[in-house]
Image: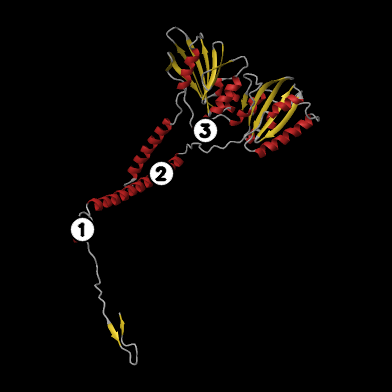
């Protein structure tokens, strides 16, 4: 049996396509997290990488997975003066995950620093995140230039594109007044929430409904309060879960405003838009209500959000080019019409009957009609003959 003549062509095309797709897949791999050098620091040896969250933190591997852990890198750097720097970098699916992991490791005794998107330090250790990457830096000896060197490092880290670089918007509704430094926590799953002693349990929060949580502590005249914000996709879902939380609280403690679901102290809640706000702790009722009154959702509409879709961008450029081309052609037509009419008028004014409308070029169609007088005489007409033209 003879093989079709085009079979070798198909085989060659298939081999070429497989190589092209393999090259595209290799090019689509995420860029390395840590640079070979920055601000005078040189990497020693090779960087250690892993896609296992247990390598980054064996104790809290499950928490990192909740935050969307992607991969991990570890490297040691040295300088000419003999100092060393150990960098541990964890990359997440988006900036929200990196921010959540940053708040998970954040401690109240850390000092706020100006590097990365948010950064802190304690002694010779620094912690910050930049985009979707969380950095834990350990210096052998801290100097006055350590912060500047970390700012250079932050500038070399890969950045996410589009909406992946945005933080959750609902955290902006946490009040700033009386906030206790470094106590904010952003939570994306039940495992991380269980480590923070929240006013309500993960079952009531219902992370299966795409909810997110932010917890912070505040100083009030009657004591320290815990403020918990639970964000849901829609106000309807928030209202449903608020009723569930109220029902559970009434079962746990019949008298509202006396005890929390999980412990003793004041408990008040409310809904504002798609956010459920809960104020709890060993504080007075008035302080709890005052703290809740500072949480007010305000919807904002953005009309100029850029799209990352290649098809939408190509269609937009096509329509834009068509509009520009039509505008150019219309402009050229107007200019040509004005120029032709203006030149003709000027030439007729300064050179009459010499350039335009010359007699030898003018053609005039004439019917050459002549008038004829016809006398009509009617018999018996006393007025005589009449002339009709």
User: Badge 3: how crowded within 10 Å, few (<14), some, or many (20+)?
Assistant: few
Q: Is residue 252 left or right of residue 301?
A: right
Q: Which of 174 and 349 is in front in this view?
A: 349
Q: Badge 1 is on which residue? A: 358
Colouring method of the image: secondary structure
Residue 50, numbered circle: none
Write down the quadrant of residue 187 in the picture: top right
Q: Residue at x 42, y 8 (%)?
A: 80
Q: In the picture shown, does residue 356 fall above or below 243? A: below
Q: Which of 158 and 114 is in front in this view?
A: 114
Could you say whether the residue bearing mark 1 is in a helix, strand or loop? loop
Residue that protrudes farthest toward the left in the picture: 360
Q: Residue at x 21, y 56 (%)?
A: 353
Give the percent coordinates (x, y) of residue 140.
51, 9
Q: Badge 2 is on which residue? A: 318
Q: Badge 3 is on which residue? A: 163
Which is nearer the N-term, disc 1 or disc 2? Answer: 2
Q: Nearer the viewer, residue 315 or 388?
A: 388
Residue that protrudes farthest toward the right in the picture: 254
């Amino acid at each position: 049996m003879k093989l079709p003549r085009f079979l070798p062509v198909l085989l060659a095309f298939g081999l070429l396509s497989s190589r092209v797709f393999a090259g595209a897949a290799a090019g689509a791999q995420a860029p390395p997290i840590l640079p070979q050098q920055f601000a005078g620091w040189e990497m020693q040896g090779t960087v250690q990488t892993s896609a296992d969250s247990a390598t980054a933190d064996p104790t809290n591997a499950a928490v990192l997975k909740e935050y969307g852990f992607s991969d991990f890198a570890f490297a040691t750097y040295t300088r000419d003066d003999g100092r060393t720097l150990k960098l541990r970098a964890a990359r997440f699916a988006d900036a929200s995950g990196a921010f959540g992991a940053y708040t998970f490791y954040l401690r109240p005794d850390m000092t706020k620093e100006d590097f990365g998107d948010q950064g802190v330090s304690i002694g010779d250790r620094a912690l910050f995140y930049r985009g979707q990457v969380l950095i834990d830096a350990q210096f052998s000896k801290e100097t006055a230039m350590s912060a500047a060197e970390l700012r250079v490092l932050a500038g070399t880290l890969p950045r996410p594109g589009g909406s992946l670089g945005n933080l959750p918007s609902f955290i902006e509704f946490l009040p700033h007044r009386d906030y206790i430094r470094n106590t904010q926590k952003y939570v994306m799953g039940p495992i991380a929430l269980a480590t923070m002693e929240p006013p309500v349990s993960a079952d009531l929060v219902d992370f299966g409904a795409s909810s997110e949580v932010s917890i912070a502590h505040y100083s009030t005249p009657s004591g320290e309060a815990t403020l918990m914000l639970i964000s849901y996709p829609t106000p309807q879902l928030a209202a449903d879960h608020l009723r569930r939380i109220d029902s559970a609280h009434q079962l746990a403690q019949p008298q509202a405003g006396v005890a929390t679901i999980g412990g003793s102290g004041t408990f008040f809640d409310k809904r504002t838009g798609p956010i459920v706000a809960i104020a709890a702790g060993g504080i007075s009722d008035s302080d709890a209500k005052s703290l809740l009154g500072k949480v007010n959702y305000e919807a904002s509409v953005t009309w100029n959000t850029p799209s990352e879709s290649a098809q939408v961008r190509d269609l937009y450029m096509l329509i834009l080019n068509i509009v520009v081309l039509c505008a150019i052609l219309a402009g050229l037509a107007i200019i040509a019409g004005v120029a032709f009419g203006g030149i003709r008028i000027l030439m007729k004014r300064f050179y009459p009957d010499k350039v335009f409308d010359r007699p030898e070029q003018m053609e005039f169609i004439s019917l050459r009609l002549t008038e004829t007088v016809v006398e009509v005489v009617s018999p018996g007409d006393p007025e005589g003959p009449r002339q009709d033209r």
